[in-house]
Image (cartoon, rainbow, N blue to C red):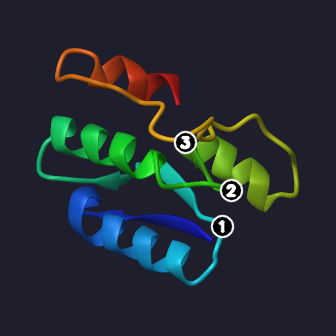
Amino acid sequence: MMVAGVWTEACIAATVRDALALGFRVLVVKDACASGTEAMHQTAILNLANRLYGGAVVATPDAIRLMDGQTIDAWQVQGSVPLRFTYTTAAALYEAM
C-alpha cells in the first residue's frame, strides 16, 4: 500500500497506523506528503519510519519505478527505533531515506 497526502503528522500518520494494524505493508512516499512546515513533515516521516516493519520510505521517482515493476533500494527500518534525531539532525536523516 502506497501512502501520500497532506498533514503528515496527522492524516498520513493515522492512515499508516491503521494500515499496519490491518496487516498491510506500507510504502510512504516522503515527498508526496506535506505538513504545515518542513520540520513538522520531516520529523513525522522519521517517526513513522520506526513503525514500518516490512514497509519502506521512498521518494516519488522510486515509487514510480515500483509501480512500473522495477526493483529499487528503499530505506527500511533495521531494528527497533533506529532513528534518533534532533531538530538539527532531522533534515539530514530525512534526506538519507
Q: Residue at 12% across / 51% down in the picture?
A: 36
Amino acid type, residue under disc 3 in the picture? Ala
Image location (x, y in percent) of residue 51? 48, 55
Mark 1 closeness class: few <14, some 14–19, many ≥20 residues within 10 Å: some
**Amino acid type, residue under disc 1 in the picture:** Arg
Q: Position of residue 49 (x, y in %)?
A: 46, 46
Q: Earlier in the sequence, mark 3 or mark 1?
A: 1
| Marks 2,1: beta carbons within 8 A | yes
Residue 54 shows which numbered tag?
A: 2
What is the number of the mark on residue 25? 1
Compare residues 49 and 69 and report the one nearer the observer: 49
Nearest to the observer: residue 25 or residue 62: 25
Q: Position of residue 59 (x, y in %)?
A: 55, 42
Q: Residue at x 28, y 16 (%)?
A: 89
Query: 79 or 74, which lies in front?
Result: 79
| 55 vs 60: above or below | below
Q: Residue furthest left?
A: 36
Label ID, residue 77: none
Image depth: mark 3 or mark 2 in front: 2
Which one is earlier in the sequence, the residue at label 2 or at label 1?
1
Left or right, 61 with respect to 87, comes to right
Q: CA distance from mark 2 to mark 1?
A: 6 Å
Q: Which residue is mark 3?
A: 59
Looking at the image, residue 23 sits to the left or right of residue 70; the answer is left
Q: Are marks 3 and 2 in contact (CB under 8 Å)?
A: no
Q: Total marks drawn?
A: 3
Horizontal relation, residue 38 to residue 5: left or right: left
